[in-house]
Amino acid sequence: MYETLPLKQTVPASGGIKQLTITTSLEACPWSFESLVSWIIPIDPLLAGSGLFSYSVAKNSSMNKRTGKITINDTTVTVIQDAADSPDIILLENNTSLKNLSLLLGERLFYKIEIPPDHYSLQITTNGGTGDCDIYASLNQNPTEDTYDL
């Protein structure tokens, strides 16, 4: 018999290391760990007996809160990670092609394009793929669904 605490943890967008307390009735009582998402990673694989179990949570660059699950034997621990305050913005070079982009509903990517002063046009094209692609562009500020220039 064993107990895992806490059953819910909140992590800042910057990520970090968190711990769970595992209490077992026998010193050598084995248990197993499984992360159901790629951004939660075990640090020290203590897999028997009582003690602290540490895991790492990767940085969340998205402006969306995310939830992941860890299972310790048959106990589920919920990890909620805060959204980033501001998005990571990726600088694109001229004639850059982005391939195999995949996002979940509500997720967003932000890119910055620096146009030289003597140039007056910008062309953005999409092709292939499935789903719904929305592109919002804005001069000198991050665009939103409500505030954008084109």
Image: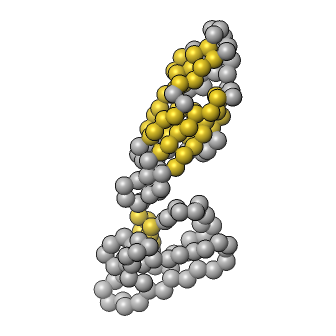
Residue 28 picture quarter = top right
Q: How is the rendered protein coloured? A: secondary structure
> Which residue is drawn at the image coordinates 54% and 46% (left, top)?
67
Q: Position of residue 98 (x, y in %)?
A: 56, 71
The quarter holding residue 127 reads bottom right
Percent of width and height locating residue 128: 67, 77
Image position of 82 with respect to 147: above or below: above
Q: Which residue is drawn at 41% across and 71% down?
A: 144
Front residue of this view, candidates 98 and 36:
36
Q: Quadrant of the N terminus?
A: top right
Can residue 41 be seen in this snapshot?
no
Question: Residue placed at 57% from the left, 20% from the top?
Answer: 22
In the image, 55: left or right of 131?
A: left
Q: Nearer the viewer, residue 94 or 55?
A: 55
| Quarter of the figure with residue 150 | bottom left
| Frontmost residue, 50 versus 128 | 50
| Above or below, comparing residue 19 to residue 65 in the picture | above
